[in-house]
Image (tube, rainbow, N blue to C red):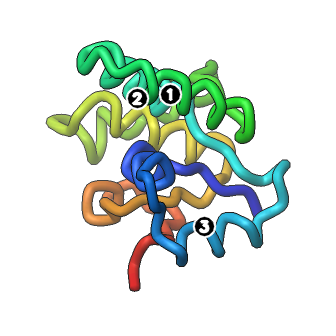
Amino acid sequence: MSYLLDTSTLLELLRAVPPQGLVRRLSQVPTGDRWTSVITVSQLLLAARQEREMRLMQDMVRLTAAIRVAPYDLNAAQAFAKFRASVAESCETDDVMIAAIAASRDFTLVTRRAQDFERYDLRLENWTAG
């Protein structure tokens, strides 16, 4: 099974001391099954630029080298259109795009914000929950 780590999960990994449960769970997943989305990467890079935080930029470069990055492709665009037209008319565009990538690639979405993604009928897990 492959996992798509969203922005909220990667932010936890970027903490000075990430939650032990998250690190433990991540270590149990084979490297080839660890993914994030290009949307999440852009969100984190934007945050680092806005904060003028070079350490965060460097951490992001290292993190994206250690995890596979799923693109927003034609299949994701089709899932996005389906979601936007049916269950996500007023949702944050980035969230809909992340959900579309997860759906189009049959990923389990790893998020701290499961309530924001329940409408998409995805497999959801929270690796930071106690």
Q: Which mark is residue 41?
A: 1
Q: Nearer the viewer, residue 8 or 71?
A: 8
Residue 35 spot, x, y in % from top left: 67, 44
Horizontal side of 25 relative to 80 (left or right) equals: right
Residue 121 spot, x, y in % from top left: 44, 61
Q: Which mark is residue 23?
A: 3
In the rendered structure, are the residues bearing label 2 and label 1 in contact, judged by CB atoms less than 8 Å apart? Answer: yes
**Residue type at the position of mark 3:** Val
Whole-number angstrom distance, CA of label 2 to CA of label 1 = 5 Å
- The quarter in which the C terminus is drawn is bottom left
Tag in front: 2 or 3: 3
**Residue type at the position of mark 1:** Val
**Residue type at the position of mark 2:** Leu
Q: Residues within 10 Å of mark 1 (few under 14, many from 20)?
A: many
- SS category of the residue bearing label 2: helix
Residue 71 spot, x, y in % from top left: 63, 24
In the rendered structure, are the residues bearing label 3 and label 1 in contact, judged by CB atoms less than 8 Å apart? Answer: no
Q: Residues within 10 Å of mark 3 (few under 14, many from 20)?
A: some
| Residue on which disc 2 sits | 44
